[in-house]
Amino acid sequence: MLTSSYAGSHTQGLYAFYWFPMGLYLYDHSSDTDGTYDLRATQMSNNTNTDCPYNTQTYSDVMRWIQLSNAALEGIEKVRAIHPADSTALNYMKGQALFNRALAYWHGQIFFEIESKAGGLGLPIIDKVPTTIDQMMPPRATTVDSWNFIISTLNQAIPLLKGYNTDLTRATEWAAKGLLAKVYMQARRPSKAVPVMEDIINNSSKALVANSIYVDMFYGNPKNEFNKENLYEIDMTENTTQNGPWAGYTTGSGMPMVFAPWPLNLDFRNKPSTTAYDIITNATGGWGNNYVHDANILRFGFTLPAPGIRVKNPNFVSSATRSTTNLPYILDTAYYNKSLAIRANKVADPRLYVCAGQPYVDTFEDALGRVTFYDRSPALNSMPQILSWNHKKFTNRLGTEAELNFSSPANYPVVRLADIYLLYAEALKDSLPVKALEYVNKVHRRAYNYPSDSPSPVDYKTFNDATMAPVGDHLHNDVLKYERWAELFAEGQWWFDIRRWEIGQQEIAYYKTTRNGTLTYNGIGYYVQPIPQTEIDRYHGTIKQSEGY
């Protein structure tokens, strides 16, 4: 039963399939899509349809995760009554189940109304296994009561988890404290978060990993997962017997198949360029529906426009084996060299290249184990103005997603120390600005391959220094917000920040459009998702809908 409470995160609506590509990546515009797919189109516009199957599945699976955790808690107490001598082991199990319940509610907070709104609505609070229909259908709690319930749950879990810090696949004391700190910040209680974060910083033995580990910790390499920086991560393992996540629970994740990189087909024979546009010559790498929104590439500081049509390679040898250095058509040499110079000279934020692969410049392996370039989405033929950089975090760089049986082993960090450092800086920014800025700089230095704890040439001097974000972007002179965006890009954290700071209107002013059309700001409804219509029907209309729907 305890194992099942961990399995709650591996359901179709969460980390097995929908959570990023059909959810957060669309809400916060980490992704654009290469078509106006079904009801994802309205999600990109932050106006999710109440019948959206992705939103419905995510809501259902959050509630299922809560159910599985409550069932484990009930089972633990039933065993305790029969075997009181096992109380110590059962307490450890109880701490884990409580953590999982709190984590489920944390994920469910994407449905909450804005925390600053008096009487805003959270999720229904279910703290035990229901035995009646009425207990299965409690009303939505207020946002304040929802956060209080999560905080209470974590405060119960922490002493039960104390001392159990060796099995990193399971909840630990520091995982619970890390989540508690994030909850306090999201609930707008920074003074409560500060001592929890100081405990983590001073006593957890956690540390920022070196840049060499950081740049390789998101791609399923077991050597760099469960490292000393991560407080808790969703554990994923390739499932060789299950083709994809749609059959139910899985040990791996199918999310990357939706934003799978497109490998350049080294064996293409058709002419890739016309007088108007490139004919994209990709091989199948997965579905590849999502690519990194072009505005994100610019926000990282990469200012070159789209490269234009590929040109004939004067050094191509048709009788030789095809490779990235022997292709009939290549990027214009000047553009290619400028792209390399930007990264070599760190003109753009180096974290861009951890998050995204540049077509015809960055490489990974194809299905035959050959090094090839990232390609553009095939749906973007005749649209050369779109950069179409590929998502890189959590993808397979040693082959295609199909080779992993659409069951990626890449773990998903939920809490890591860089996140805590930046939240700590946010909490101290007004009262202790010098100390706060130092914690921002620790994260910033690591990104630029400098020692985290020593002054560096890239240090920010004030919180209003210019960032890599372009002039006119609200992040251009907002160091704290930019660093959270850049450091945690595509890890599912930015949407929580947008909601906490209520910066939706500024974000829309920056992103302006998606492939679904012009973005518009619809007030508080921008920040929340609807209760699915099926849930309202099951409640016979008695559960309150989110504002704006």
Image: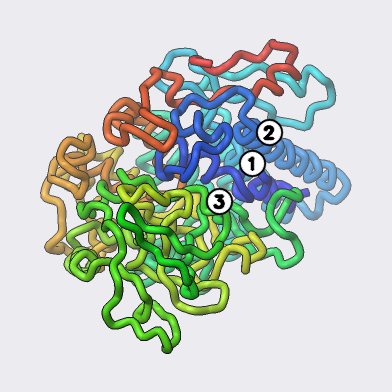
**Nearer to us: label 3 or label 2:** 3
Going by the numbered disc 1, the residue's amino acid type is: Gly
Q: Is residue 516 left or right of residue 94?
A: left
Residue 443 visible in rendering: yes
**Nearer to us: label 3 or label 1:** 3
Q: Secondary structure at mark 3?
A: helix
For label 3, the residue is: 258
Image coords of residue 27 (percent x, y): 45, 35
Going by the numbered disc 3, the residue's amino acid type is: Val
Going by the numbered disc 2, the residue's amino acid type is: Ser
For label 2, the residue is: 60
Q: Earlier in the sequence, mark 1 or mark 2?
A: 1
Q: Residue at x 52, y 45 (%)?
A: 20
Image coords of residue 457 (percent x, y): 12, 63
**Mark 2 neighbour density, 10 Å: few (under 14) some (14–19) many (20 or more):** many
Q: Earlier in the sequence, mark 3 or mark 2?
A: 2
What distance separates the C-alpha of mark 1 from that of mark 2? 8 Å
Image coords of residue 188 (percent x, y): 38, 29
Tell me, for residue 163, which label it has, or none.
none
**Pointers 3 and 1 in contact (CB under 8 A)?**
no
